[in-house]
Image (cartoon, rainbow, N blue to C red):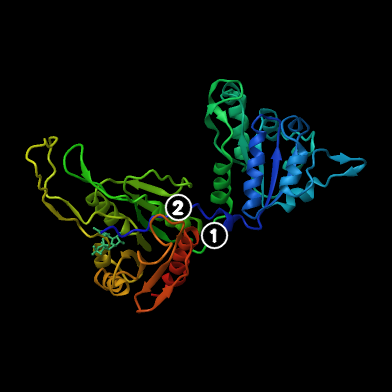
Amino acid sequence: MITVVFVYFQPFIDIMLKGKKILIGITGSIAAYKSILLIRLLIKAGAEVKVVMTPSAKDFVSPLVLSTLSKNEVIVDLTNEHVWANHVMLGRWADVMLIAPLSCNTLAKMANGFCDNLLSAVYLSATCPVAVAPAMDEDMWHHPSTNRNLELIKSYGNKIIAVEKGELASGLFGDGRMAEPETILNYLVENFFRGNELEGKKVLVTAGPTYEAMDPVRFIGNHSTGKMGFAIAEEMYLEGADVTLVTGPTNQQVNYKNINVIHITSSDEMFDACSKHFINADIAVMSAAVADYRPIETSLQKIKKQEQEFNLQLTRTKDILAHLGKEKKQNQFLVGFALETNNEKQNAMGKLKNKNADCIILNSLNDKEAGFGFDTNKISILYRDGSETNFDLKSKKEVAKDIVSFVISHVNEK
Ligand code: CTP
């Protein structure tokens, strides 16, 4: 039986960005239209946003749009009808200054300390960290002066958000597209706003299905999407943990490049990867839908159809959770999953004990609007001391948060 919850989940960027002060600098580039989307995402995530623009940026995006979305006045000039714009205080107000898009021209000014407009003055006086998202045509992007200027601003401590390959404003295809707003958002969270509840902890998470080969082209698998495991891995990471994610075949991708993702196919490969990484782990969460059986033999040749009936002999796979439970040391915290249809609590408690886990996340297929096919879920967490924490039906995003919060509050109890 598959024992994983399939959920749709977005990372917890809203929680991480809530109340954070982001100062956006916009320069003259076609990519300025993406800043509109970026500001909208930031505001939706609960961040406070202020915008400064270069005069030429106004040719690409209207200050009225930006002030409406950011809910703050957009500042372009150092003086406005004899009133001086306080660039120093803007740079001190922000938790992070993000220049997106960053044009070649403003890059060159930043590299050389020019201060001929409000944006460059704010940049030079900013005491907060600064990240930039360059946007330019491929030839400009590869020009030696661009490379040199990027190296220079990097050496000043500025962070560079990598450009993407794709269609460019010139009609050419190549490097130089500004990163997408969602990528920039994830970058900000990853680099500036991770929590520290799990700082210093190593976390191992499994996700997705396993495929058990019958022959070179066929396998026994299941419908796990891996979303739950990926969500847990990302949430652990956002709480400061050093995360290794061992995943079976899925379409999921992690949003944070510093999560160590190990791709496996079979339960045996997942077993090997987990055994290796569990040695140094503080916490392990086994949310993968590991196949319980695999073919006794894997044919080296494609199996040809023959008789009307075909019998495939299967044998049990290694139980990874149970194995880690045996190996577990006093300071390690092990979490398993159980998806049950009957005698739910009893069965899940049995798994907790038999596999020597510290807690089991129980889903019942009997709960309405919970589990497969719903955006909501309802879990109970059974703890090793016999206690049971029941959670209301809630969005799956909140469910993943609950699981990680539970682990955080119990991991140091040993
Ligand atoms: N698990 C594992 N290795 C396996 C099978 C399952 O690590 N070979 C883990 C899953 O990742 C999950 C938990 O064990 O955390 C599920 O327990 P399991 O007893 O396998 O549940 P079911 O597959 O539902 O088994 P049963 O049919 O006995 O209910």
Viewer-proximal residue among 126 and 286: 286
- Tell me if residue 404 can be seen: yes
Horizontal arrangement in the rendering, residue 233 relative to residue 304 (left or right): right
Q: Is residue 200 visible?
A: no
Determine the image quadrant of residue 324.
bottom left
User: SS at mark 2?
Assistant: loop
The residue drawn where x is 45% and y is 69% is 406
Give left or right: position of 372 versus 31. Answer: left
Establish if 48 lies above or below 123. below
User: In the orientation shown, which residue stands out farthest toward the left?
Assistant: 307
Dot label at residue 195: 1
Instruction: Determine whether 113 is above or below 314 in the image.
Output: above
Q: How many marks?
A: 2
Position of residue 341 relative to residue 176, above or below, is: below
Q: Quadrant of the N terminus?
A: bottom left
**Which residue is drawn at the image coordinates 54% and 42% (left, top)?**
183
**Residue 87 in the image: x percent, y percent?**
79, 45
Q: CA distance from mark 2 to mark 1?
A: 23 Å
- Residue 220 - label: none
Name the foreground residue: 411 vs 107. 411
Residue highlighted by disc 2: 8
Is 18 positioned to the left or the right of 253 in the image?
A: right
Q: Nearer the viewer, residue 6 or 100?
A: 6
Q: Quadrant of ligand 1?
A: bottom left
In the rendered image, the residue lying farthest to the right is 82
> Disc 2 marks which amino acid?
Tyr
Measured from the top left, where is residue 98 in percent x and y?
65, 43
Q: Which quarter of the figure is the C terminus placed in?
A: bottom left
Tag nearer the camera, 2 or 1: 2
The picture quadrant where one finds residue 301 is top left
How many other residues sit within 10 Å of disc 2, few (<14), some (14-19) or many (≥20)? some
Name the amino acid, label 1. Answer: Gly
